[in-house]
Amino acid sequence: MGCFPCFESREDEKLNSNKQIDHRKQSCPTLPSNMSRLSSGADRLKSRSNVGSRKEPPSQKDAPDANIAAQTFTFRELAAATKNFRPESFLGEGGFGSVYKGRLESTGQAVAVKQLDRNGLQGNREFLVEVLMLSLLHHSNLVSLIGYCADGDQRLLVYEFMALGSLEDHLHDLPPGKGPLDWNTRMKIAAGAAKGLEYLHDKANPPVIYRDFKSSNILLDEGYQPKLSDFGLAKLGPTGDKSHVSTRVMGTYGYCAPEYAMTGQLTVKSDVYSFGVVFLELITGRKAVDSTRPSGEHNLVAWARPLFNDRRKFVKLADPRLQGQYPMRGLYQALAVASMCIQEQAAARPLIGDVVTALSYLVNQTYDPNTKSSGDKDDKRNKDERIGRILKNEEGGGSGRKWDFEGSERDDSPKETARMLNRDLDRERAVAEAKMWGENWREKRRQNAHGSFDGTNG
């Protein structure tokens, strides 16, 4: 039996009751029986006069028996923090509502305040789910919820402020003078976001399906540390002998897994597909859906899939703004991971834990455009020779090349190489490849005593 029961909020549930979320640190997240009831900022304001000035609530780590998972704020406090939600404080807008930058007068802490759109169809439900999820789930790659406001009909969420904005801001529609993300930073962001998903899928019990993984929901802290945000659409995954949960289709076009979009059947592999789309965005610099592109290139996955079948065309998948500043071997490996994640059949996709293993290896293979080692194959002459050999092999037989995650080369037929990246890759081979990469890297990590690369729970 899981550590917390499945839940769905109802529109008529009272959000302004006097009961609070009980939060006790256990081996996995726990939802209390009164999870649907949140104390309002007004309730806390009334009680404050009896205890004097407010103190910061202890963190979950320091006080596992704390009764309050998140602070409650009055609307007046948050209006003051954002200077009455003035346009200068506006950061952006999403499905939930508008987001403003603010500074809490009591602590001076910079925060992001998300205000519910009261005309939205799912605002109350998303609000409740997000408060509960982020009160119970803590990880370095998940955004931290500081508190909320449930004054009257006002619904606001208060998060830690992420100084660098969203991944989308750094990938698409860059303003003049702003350079693109380099290859190493892109791999770092991909690996960190995957670790956030790994925590939701493998550490939470039952697993949590994020359901809205996209570039605009990946926020970046100092040093480009990625954190997943916006948990309003999150669902608890299947338990016991169930293979999926059935729900109405929600999410963003271009990121939704095909089986979920067609049947409403949701699994953790649905998130893996969405991750694959975002990873392709990082590699290519293209949007998931871009109507300004030529015909046939509007949908990123549909455009990329045919290119996976021909290694000679792999360079076309690299973001041209990188101007060739990326490792060819790393590009091949990254494309292999992305290709496996966006398999049409959910069972053929790897588990997110195997994706984390593969990406952790890529992150550790730091690319330095100014350093060319004797074994580096990225200079133009060797690259042309290698492509020429592959081309010759595909036309006249011989042996092609496949790169494994230990960095070695091994002979294999071009047919098998293409098959690895082919959209019709059979599920057994796909899963076996992912597990092999994981085992190889774990063995290499133990031998070299490099330490753990797995995500740590916050």
Image (cartoon, rainbow, N blue to C red):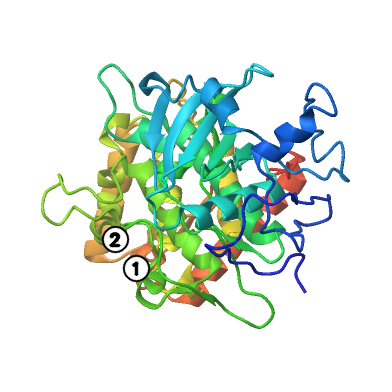
Q: Secondary structure at mark 2?
A: helix
Q: Compared with residue 114, is residue 106 higher up or lower down, i.e. above or below?
A: above
- Work out whether residue 162 or residue 365 is closer to the camera in this orientation and state it: 162
| Residue 431, image quadrant | bottom right
**Mark 2 near mark 1, Cβ–Cβ under 8 Å?**
yes
Tally of marks: 2
Viewport quadrant of the C terminus: top right
Question: Residue at left 67%, top 60%?
Answer: 202
Question: Residue at left 58%, top 55%?
Answer: 129
Drawn side of residue 126 relative to residue 290, left or right: right
| Residue 255, image quadrant | bottom left
Q: Position of residue 387 (x, y in %)?
A: 29, 48
- Work out whether residue 449 or residue 74 is closer to the camera in this orientation and state it: 74
Drawn side of residue 44 relative to residue 222, left or right: right
The amino acid type, in three-letter code, at marker 1 is Arg
Q: Compared with residue 266, is residue 142 higher up or lower down, i.e. above or below?
A: above
Q: CA distance from mark 2 to mark 1?
A: 7 Å
Residue at the extreme left of the image, as rendered: 295
Q: Is residue 213 visible?
A: yes
Q: Position of residue 204 (x, y in %)?
A: 70, 59
Q: Earlier in the sequence, mark 2 or mark 1?
A: 2
Viewport quadrant of the N terminus: bottom right
The amino acid type, in three-letter code, at marker 2 is Arg
Q: Position of residue 86 (x, y in %)?
A: 40, 22
The residue indicated by pointer 2 is 305
Question: Residue at left 41%, top 65%?
Answer: 420
What label sits on residue 423 in the rendered view? Answer: 1
Q: Categorize mark 1 by other alpha carbons within 10 Å: few (<14), some (14-19), many (20+).
A: some
Q: Position of residue 144 (x, y in %)?
A: 63, 38
- Work out whether residue 218 or residue 414 is closer to the camera in this orientation and state it: 218
Residue at the extreme bottom of the image, as rendered: 241
